[in-house]
């Protein structure tokens, strides 16, 4: 008996919708990363990109527990001396909640070509509407 190995050409990708309203940002990101990677499938193969598409709606209603809104910061550096810029998550969740959710999911994916390709299948929307009805996405609870 041989072990089944999935092939990139034979993987059929479905679309899933995750609703982030009232749920912790981390739990939403974990559920999305698992689907994007394909770990929920019985034919999961680590070296093959067998993940599926994920749509996250209501990103602005995602919750950060504890005092993370004030204590957690998004930092970036321009590359120049004194070029560190930081933004609190309170400000980030007000201005760009889609970006905050995408950062959380990106941190949970592998840092290689499979992770980069998986991140392109993530679609995040601020409100409850999305433009992927034609793909007939499946609502998924987490």
Image: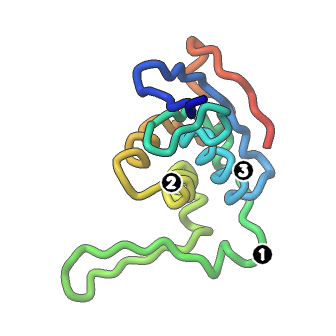
* Residue located beneath label 2 in the image: 109
Left or right: 97 in relation to 86: right
Q: Of discs 3 and 2, which sits in the foreground?
A: 2
Locate residue 133: give its quadrant.
top right
Question: Which is nearer the N-term, disc 3 or disc 1?
Answer: 3
* Residue located beneath label 1 in the image: 66
Q: Nearer the viewer, residue 20 or 5?
A: 5
Q: Of discs 2 and 1, which sits in the foreground?
A: 2
Question: Considering only vertical position in the picture, is 54 above or below 111?
Answer: above
Secondary structure of the residue carrying numbered label 2: loop
Whole-percent x and y of residue 69? 66, 72
Q: State yes or no: discs 3 and 2 in contact (Cβ < 8 Å).
A: no
Can residue 40 be seen in this snapshot?
Answer: yes
Question: Which is nearer the N-term, disc 3 or disc 2?
Answer: 3
Locate residue 92: give its quadrant.
bottom right
Give the distance between the C-alpha atoms of the residues marked 3 and 2, in whole angstroms.
23 Å
Q: Residues within 10 Å of mark 1 (few under 14, many from 20)?
A: few
Secondary structure of the residue carrying numbered label 1: loop
Looking at the image, which residue is at 45% across and 36% down?
49
Q: Which residue lies furthest to the bottom in this view?
A: 82
Q: How crowded is mark 3: few (under 14 residues within 10 Å), some or many (20 or more)?
A: many
Looking at the image, which residue is at 68% across and 57% down?
25
Give the distance between the C-alpha atoms of the residues marked 2 and 1, in whole angstroms.
24 Å
The numbered mark at residue 61 is 3
């Amino acid at each position: 008996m041989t072990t089944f190995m999935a092939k990139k050409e034979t993987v059929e990708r479905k679309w899933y919708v995750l609703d982030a309203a009232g749920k912790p940002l981390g739990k939403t990101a974990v559920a999305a990363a698992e689907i994007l990677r394909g770990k929920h499938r019985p034919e999961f193969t680590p070296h093959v990109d067998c993940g599926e598409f994920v749509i996250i709606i209501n990103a602005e209603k995602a919750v950060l527990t504890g005092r993370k809104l004030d204590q957690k910061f998004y930092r970036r550096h321009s590359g120049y001396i004194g070029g560190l810029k930081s933004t609190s998550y309170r400000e980030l969740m007000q201005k760009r909640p889609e970006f905050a959710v995408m950062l959380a999911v990106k941190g949970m994916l592998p840092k290689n070509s499979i992770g980069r390709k998986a991140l392109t299948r993530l679609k995040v929307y601020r409100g409850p509407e999305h433009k992927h009805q034609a793909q007939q996405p499946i609502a998924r609870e987490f």
